[in-house]
Amino acid sequence: MSRSKKKTKIQGITSATSEKANKQEANRKFRRVVKQKVKLGKTELPELREISNVWAFDKDGKIYDSEMTAKELRK
């Protein structure tokens, strides 16, 4: 991988490397709510987006940076 590099100058805004823990927590909460509703016999089940807020996750998105150096473009 010594010659591989990013083609576009886009980088993350935050220092968080992953949202894995946030996604695990959201899915656990979702499964718990679904199990409770199934036990009660409810026919309408919630969507994942109704239970968790993706805007509250650790990462804040990505941004285009036209002044990225060659070192920052390396994988």
Image (cartoon, rainbow, N blue to C red):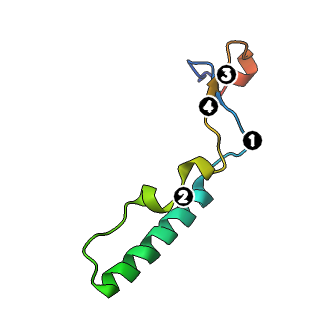
| Residue 62, numbered label | 4
Q: Which residue is mark 3?
A: 73
Of 47 and 9, which appears nearest the observer? 47
Residue type at tag 3: Leu
Residue type at tag 2: Lys
State the separation of the CA atoms marked 2 and 4.
18 Å
Mark closer to the observer (3, 4): 4
| Marks 3 & 1, CB-CB < 8 Å contact | no
Quick one: label 3 or label 1, which is nearer the N terminus? 1
Of 7 and 10, which appears nearest the observer? 10
Q: Secondary structure at mark 1?
A: loop
| Residue 15, numbered label | 1
Residue type at tag 4: Lys
Q: Secondary structure at mark 2?
A: helix
Q: Residues within 10 Å of mark 2 (few under 14, many from 20)?
A: some
State the separation of the CA atoms marked 4 and 1.
11 Å
The residue shown at (54%, 58%) is 23
Residue type at tag 1: Ser
Q: Position of residue 65 (x, y in %)?
A: 68, 18
Q: Position of residue 45 (x, y in %)?
A: 32, 69
Q: Secondary structure at mark 3?
A: helix
